[in-house]
Amino acid sequence: MQGTITRRWKRGAACALALATGAALAAPALAAPAVAASGKAAPLPLVPYPASLERTGGSFTLAHDAALLVPAADRDAARAARLLATHAATDAGLALTVREGDGPGAVRFVRDASVTGKEAYRLIVTAKGVTIAASQASGFVYGAMTLLQLLGSGEVAKGGVRIPALTIADAPRFAWRGLMIDTARHFQSLPSLRAAIDAMAEVKLNVLHLHLTDDQGWRFEVKRYPRLTEAGAWRTSPDASGGESAKADVGGFYTQDELRALVAYAAERGVTIVPEIDLPGHAQALIAAYPELGVIGAKTEVSHDWGINPYLFNPGPEGIRFVEDVLDELMAVFPSQTIHLGGDEAVKDQWERSPQVQAQMRTLGIATENGLQSWMIGKLGDYLAAHGRRLMGWDEILEGGVPASASVMSWRGEEGGIAAANAGHDVVLSPSPQLYLDNRQSDLGDEPAGRGFTQTLEAIYSYDPMPKGIGADKAGHVLGVQANAWSEYLVTPWQMQHKLFPRAGALAEVAWSKEATGARDYAGFLTRLDPQIRRWKREGIEVADSAFAVDFALAAPRGAALDAAKVGVTLATQAPYGTIRYTLDGSAPGARSKAYTRALAVPSGTTITAASFAADGTALSAARRFDTAPAALMTTPNAALSGCAGARLWLRLPLGPDATTKGPAYNVNIFDACQADTHAPLGHARSVSVTVVRLPRNFGLAHDIWSQALHYPVSAHGELVASLDCGAAAKAAKADPKTASAALHHDPLPGATLLATWPLPDPAPVSGRSPQRFTVHAVLPEVPMKDESDVCFQFTAPLSGPLYAVESVAWSKDAK
């Protein structure tokens, strides 16, 4: 079925709230080597693309019940063969048998010392069969996954699948090809982690960085300190009235045995799990469990606020001994050479206000709190080195000086990575916002909650993890690249997977394939990625369709569309792949529906339903709808609103921060609750209805609290103030530095025209429960107005209460 579509007035605002239209058409088996229309062989469906590939002519047919032959007693080859057989059964319906020893075999795994490199492999297909050669375990896995991709993405025909004859000699560009999954803000289940590992292995991603501790939860069982998980793993849930749930029942943790099993599962798939214990900041869950490990004697609870909280752990002898005890147990579970100790966003106010910490600094001869963090990192780095491990931290560890042996993960842009590499430290590039996958993937109205930057599939594909500022003689210090999925808004496996895939495929190409000598071939990449997306879907992975979703835009300003007998609408997708097909009768489009070739002109009131399709008729996206009825055109949804006076809408928030069901999400500015309809059709409007949502204000802003805009409420709980020409008024106010501050905190702004004011209801009434969504109405004043106007909706609620946002603005021709 289709969902309700909201509409948008300029490209870049969201347009759709849509549901899947039913099962996609089954993809055909790769019955023969694909041939492009030009007669040339189409690109093989390989992601990432191998370092060297030579087509040799002819093919080999891999039949059902074919044998995968592995050398006797070669456990590495046997594991890779079993992995191939399992995936082939799921992804292609192809039954393969693993056999050990000599003799005939359709696919032979061969250990070959001439294939140098831990992850290198050679894959040869001839008319007689397939050979996968490697010298180490990961090479066998990656050779098997390349063969899996050559099988295609659909059910194999009874006669088997034809594989083109070729020779592939492959090895990665970078050794570190990672994903980070945050298990602290929201606990991620073990089945969902195993599913992510399987999906990573298929595209040769080899590092799963688990963020195991933070202010919102401690997930790693430490037997010497049981309260870390008895108390530190659980928190309350904030609500939109400004309160919280009575019971601390949000969270969870992993036992050491569970994590050992996960480590073994990942290792069999060529994936190393790197654990992170975040210190000295992001330590509120730790201090909630063991207050004596704090620094100013303040007791606290596990936090439910996202962002930066003030709690730091005690860097004195007791604190260092605690961390060493934790590391002993962590190293016993995780064999990874790298142990990540965080070091990010540790605001030093508690250390600055602690006589004990200040005395320690004087004793050590350390002048600054950043220097104390550097000393701590050095101590822990030495401890790890004594146990054969290496410390890694976020790029803040550079601020006070960093031990020579430490590796740096650069997240605040690329500057930290450039500085670290040029100073001789190994680095992993993981910059925000470029590789933060919890950012939204499009501006569509049905995008789930997340950060407010838009990081498209193409943006990930275009990223180069070798910044220009790194000297040629220091390039070897770049270990690789990692994308991160922070879980403030990723509560369920569906939400996590929707953020990771398909962008993980683009990351894999960037990390594995050799450096492009010219412009990257994004269109060619999409052709190769499509079969992998289908493969992931067959495995039950949720794959976002954002890159292929149809977006709608009016071909003329909204006022002109309202006056026209026919409404002009353009359709587009992010990705240059597939064909847009549409219907005008409300039915779901299919592979035979009319193809979109030019802007549509449809009678007012027509609903356009559209989706994109691959050349074989398989749906690439869910169907989304656009309603051209006048009432629909006069309604502005949240995703089409802007920040007031050019401000950024920093986050896209759900109704509830811990909700496990799919629901709407709202673009908001948490620093100033103001949203603008910059294309309001006031030339056609006599009244307005505004639907408002109340959201929890659960943010740790640290020193950014001073960036919040204060507004003077003139009623008990604040107001919603609508004003005309607010953008111009803000620009004029900023032009005079002497009066700017006072003017910008005045509602409405001087020079703007007041349209309406509504007092906000009590968010926490004594009896009953205040609704989280409500609608207010007003007749517009008799003042000069025109279409394409700029109207601001400013909330003046106290910062101590909940956050407000506009869900939609419905303008009406009726004065009622």
Image (spheres, helix red, strand yellow):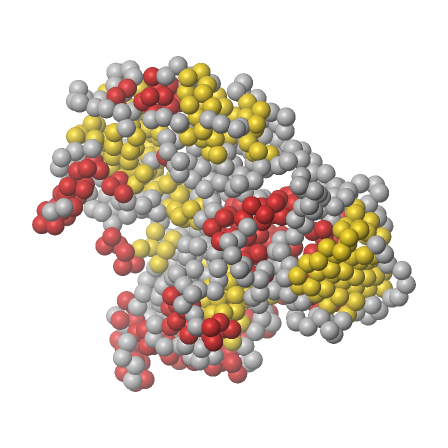
User: On the picture, is 782 further left or further right than 497?
Assistant: left
Residue 137 shows up from this direction: yes
Residue 229 visible in this rendered orientation of the protein: no
**Front-most of 189 and 688?**
688
In the image, taking residue 571 as reference, residue 508 lies left or right, namely right
* Residue that lies at the very extreme toward the front in this rendered image: 38
Position of 745 relative to 683 (above/below) = below
Q: How many labels were placed on the picture?
A: 0
Residue 272 x, y percent position in the rendering: 60, 65
Left or right of 181: which side holds 313?
Answer: left
Quadrant of the drawing holding the C terminus:
top left
Q: Residue at x 42, y 46 (%)?
A: 454
Residue lying at the far right in this picture: please name it.
103
Tell which of 210 and 232 is nearer to you. Answer: 210
Residue located at (34% from left, 59% from top): 309
Query: Percent x, y for residue 115?
Result: 71, 71
Between 132 and 280, the one lying in front of the other is 132
Residue under the point 32% across and 73% down: 370
Q: Name above or below for residue 303 compared with residue 794.
A: below
Farthest residue, direction left: 738
* Above or below 709: residue 761: above
Tell me which corner region of the image, top left, top right, bottom left or bottom right, holds residue 568: top left
**Residue under the image location 16 percent in, 30 percent down:** 753
Quarter that holds the N terminus: top right
Q: Where is residue 224 in the image (x, y as percent from the top left)?
A: 52, 72
Q: Position of residue 634 (x, y in %)?
A: 34, 23
Is residue 660 toward the left or the right of residue 394 in the image? Answer: right
Q: In which quarter of the image is residue 125?
A: bottom right
